[in-house]
Image (cartoon, rainbow, N blue to C red):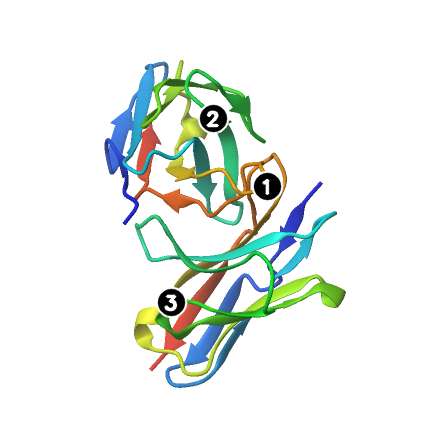
Amino acid sequence: AQSVTQPDIHITVSEGASLELRCNYSYGATPYLFWYVQSPGQGLQLLLKYFSGDTLVQGIKGFEAEFKRSQSSFNLRKPSVHWSDAAEYFCAVGGGADGLTFGKGTHLIIQP
Amino acid sequence: DVKVTQSSRYLVKRTGEKVFLECVQDMDHENMFWYRQDPGLGLRLIYFSYDVKMKEKGDIPEGYSVSREKKERFSLILESASTNQTSMYLCASSSTSLYGGVSYEQYFGPGTRLTVT
């Protein structure tokens, strides 16, 4: 069965600092990988996705993620965070007939 | 842009009531999903649908049913609401991937926060 682990429940970063959110997945074949962001009281918005090809993918809002097959990871990065990046971030994996499996989320707090 | 709308942002119902949550998407997507979201548990799949009149159980279908009479509309039904169904409910839709399956990117609605008292 597919699964996603986001090891960090909360992360606090100072505004302007770099960010890395971790995501590890378990999947039997080549996965489709996604990062979503959820602002308070809102639905989920797709940040970026990986299907195949270049393992470094660029997304919206200045985010990027790197697929590392050997580590079963798909970590999300941003070189300089803004206060508006404070939100909940979800990693998801899929590729078969059962839809997407989501991690439990990482809550990002931005310190001024 | 894909638009997924949900009938209510906030809903308060009493225990034992029958509750309908409606979801509509405007991109002719084949697949639609209902999730519930609870703090510390992330998103959990309740039901999904590949096509009109088709439905598949997700991870936590107990206490819920669904209806898909038209391609653009997917309804979640709580036959007899209970307090443990107080949650945020999220609807999503997606198109079928090139290789079949139901794992293309999903587009989400704004959510319905349901409180059962």
The single residue placed furthest to the bottom in the displayed view is A16
Q: Disc 3 marks which residue?
A: A60
Tally of numbered discs: 3
Asked whether the residues under the numbered discs 1 and 3 touch, taking CB atoms below 8 Å apart as contact, a structural biologist would say: no
Residue A104 position in % (x across, y down): 54, 51
Q: Is residue B60 above or below residue B37?
A: above
Q: Residue at x 76, y 66 (%)?
A: A70
| Parent chain of label 3 | A
Q: Are marks 1 and 3 on the same chain?
A: no
Residue density around tag 2, few if under 14, some if 14–19, many if 20 or more, within 10 Å:
many
Query: N-terminal of the two: label 2 or label 1?
Result: 2
Q: Is residue B57 above or below residue B41?
A: above
Residue B88 position in % (x across, y down): 38, 39
Task: Give whichever of B73, B79 is nearer the camera.
Answer: B73
Q: Disc 2 marks which residue?
A: B49
Q: Disc 1 marks which residue?
A: B99
Tell me how far mark 2 sits from mark 1, CA to CA.
18 Å
Q: Is residue B43 above or below residue A88?
A: above
Q: Is residue B72 above or below residue B35?
A: above
Q: Are marks 2 and 1 on the same chain?
A: yes
Q: Residue at x 32, y 15 (%)?
A: B17
